Amino acid sequence: MDVGFLGLGRMGRAMAAQLVAAGHNVRVWNRSPDPARQVAGATPVASAAEAFRGDAAITMLADDAALRSVIVEGGLLDAPERPAVHVSMSTISVALAQELAPIHARAGVTYVGAPVFGRPDAAEKGALNIVAAGDDRAISTVQPLLDAMGVKTWRFGEEPHRANAVKLAGNFMLMSAIEAMGEACALVEGHGVKGADLLDLLTNTLFASPVYKGYGALIAEKRYEPPGFTMRLGAKDIRLALAAAEAVGVPLGFGSVLRDNFIDALSHGDGDKDFAALASVAARRSGQG
């Protein structure tokens, strides 16, 4: 397929590389040009408009502001050439996704929400789990692209914003697991037991799952750099989850705790650490770190 890829952070570069490896014709664009030159086999282009055309365009931009700036304010939906399908793979707000779908429809571009679960190492292996929502035929059309980047595509209906709601709910659960591990470690450390020993026990018995084992290892080793996913992005995601919950009248009590703990971490200069460092907030508050 002829595809444009916009947004080449660590995740985006790995995802674009998987598309190239699968034999697709890939044009790549990033605000700073160097990352575009790092995707071997792809064609770097000088403008977002040159990437936003073809059979499909994929965006993996940092946040709501970046996506709005490039796609809407940048006038890409009014450009002479537009893609048949826009696959939005960024973690964005439910509200923005609800806004983007009708704007795209008026421009004759099908909008698909398809955020991902997985860290950069999974992206480098084409092993992401992709959450997709939107026109079913459009998703089927771009399925070869999704298959190149992920191990499975999970479909959640015809309204694109549903995919973003699922993504934010999943991230909320993940952050909750990190917070629980951090507080549990602080508890046992207060009684003379190493937190690493607690996590070794629990992540191999009661909580022997990828999230607990993977993030548990980072917490046990206090290995928060280099980050796979930063605290700053985690703070952004919990704000989006709280906003999505409020919009439908759902109290997200623990979400408010997580938001405050992210603020605590950021105020202590941890914004560029891996968001597993959320666990360090409980240790610091208890005088252990």
Image (cartoon, rainbow, N blue to C red):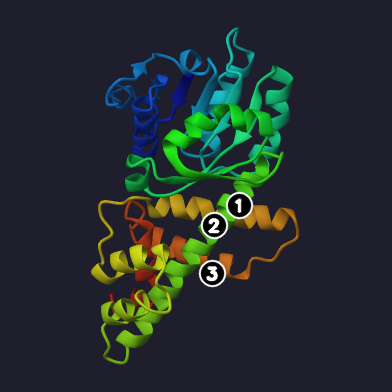
Give the SS element for disc 3: helix
Would residue 280 be visible to someone looking at this image?
yes
- Measure the C-alpha gap from mark 1 to mark 3: 20 Å
Q: Which residue is mark 3?
A: 257
Would residue 59 be visible to someone looking at this image?
no
- Measure the C-alpha gap from mark 2 to mark 1: 6 Å
Q: Which residue is mark 1?
A: 166
Give the SS element for disc 1: helix
Which one is in front in this view, the residue at disc 1 or the one at disc 3? 1
Which comes before the other along the chain, label 2 or label 3? 2
Q: Which residue is mark 2?
A: 170
The amino acid type, in three-letter code, at marker 1 is: Val
Residue displayed at 34% across by 36% down: 14
The amino acid type, in three-letter code, at marker 2 is: Gly
Give the SS element for disc 2: helix
Measured from the top left, where is residue 74 in percent x and y? 55, 20
Circles 1 and 3: CB distance less than 8 Å? no
Mark 2 surroundings within 10 Å by alpha-carbon count, few (fewer than 14), some (14 through 19), many (20 or more): some
Circles 2 and 3: CB distance less than 8 Å? no
Residue displayed at 55% across by 34% down: 88
Mark identifier at residue 66: none
Horizontal side of 162 relative to 117 (left or right) equals right
Circles 2 and 1: CB distance less than 8 Å? yes
Measured from the top left, where is residue 114 in percent x and y? 56, 39
